[in-house]
Amino acid sequence: MARTYAEAGVDIDASDRATAALVAQLGSATRKGDGAPITLENGFAGLVQLGAGALAVCTDGVGTKLLLARELSSLETVGIDCVAMNVNDLICVGAEPLSFVDYVALEEPDAELMAQLGAGLAEGCRQANCTLSGGETAVVPELVRGFDLAGTVVGWVTREAIIDGSRVDVGDALIGLASSGPHSNGYTLIRRLFDGDPALGAQLVAPTRIYVRSVLALLAAVEVHALAHVTGGGLENLPRMNPSFRYVVDNPLPVPPAFDWLQRKGDIAPVEMYRTFNMGLGMVVAVAAGDAVRALELLAREGETAQLIGHVAAGEGVAHAALD
């Protein structure tokens, strides 16, 4: 039985090296003026100059959660996942999502499947308050078995409102926003462990929570120093806010039952759990300590389950009991 993500078939370190090899080529294809790149440390979204502001772009898919959703007849939810994985990254640079396009690769034409995917995509865009602007469908039986779903979101942010992590400082408060479950990460391992229990299955295919409305409301009211969308890699996403600091998580959000079950079922070490899954933490916000109470009150009014989970300290990396 797989006890690590790598044993299940996904080596996070190898994936990071492969991504770095691609990123190393990005600077060779740029332009000047409108469309010129704006370089950020956090890498949650790409930014290019456009007039007085910046165009923000993200692209992502749902991954092998699609396979579990199909097994559990829950395909109407995966369109929400696709939108969520994109827009939740986009807001980390302070941008507001405007337009979303999808790409569906199919083994064979399937009208019922496309209707289910379309319903989820539309609902995700409603939650994110962005336009579903269409997309592309390709029937490629030599490339895929079943189907794959990905999308791209475009957003806008004024130059002065870009969140680049430069305002992060020692003593900042870290606020955690609860996830709705594993979101769309770790499913290659999850599928190795899932035993068909319908109650657990419902937790595992719950759509990724979309934080756009609550985070945009927060940005309008409080000076936010940085944001991190907690996806693949779990807590290792936090240093993406600014790698020059240490992120101390000493009051984590409660771990949802699905994660406890996965850990017991797979006999997975705590460090592997927190390196693979979000463990109930979907988004992290860094604000000045004096703004923490106000931020928490606002997030509660917006319907988020949020709490103070830690603080920023001198050093590097992440401090959490499971990682020590």
Image (cartoon, rainbow, N blue to C red):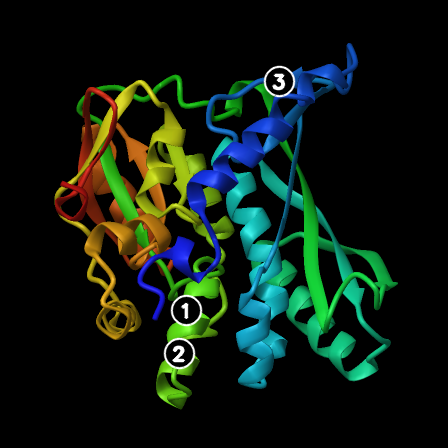
Q: Residue at x 74, y 18 (%)?
A: 51
As helix, strand or loop, the secondary structure at mark 2 comes to loop
Residue type, numbered disc 1: Ile
Residue 243, located in which quarter of the rendered image? top left
Give the residue at mark 2.
194
- State the residue at coordinates (61%, 56%): 83
Mark 2 nearby-residue class (10 Å; few <14, some 14–19, many ≥20): some
Alpha carbons under labels 2 and 3: distance apart: 42 Å
Residue 12 appears at what percent x and percent y?
44, 45
Q: Quadrant of the C terminus?
A: top left
Q: Is residue 146 visible?
A: yes
Kind of residue indicated by mark 2 = Phe
The numbered disc on residue 38 is: 3
Upstream in sequence: badge 1 or badge 3: 3
- Quadrant housing the N terminus: bottom left
Where is residue 44 shown, x and y percent of the image?
52, 35
Q: Who's the residue at 12% across and 46% down the image? A: 321
Residue 190 numbered mark, or none: 1
Query: How far, Cα to Cα, is label 2 from label 1?
Result: 6 Å
| Residue 19 or residue 253, whichever sits in front | 19
Look at the picture and state if 31 lies above or below 155.
Answer: above
Secondary structure state at the residue bearing disc 3:
strand
For mark 1, give the secondary structure. helix
Instruction: Mark 2 and mark 3 in contact? Answer it, CB < 8 Å.
Output: no
Going from the N terminus, do you reach mark 2 or mark 3 first? Answer: 3
Residue at the location (37% across, 88% down)?
A: 197
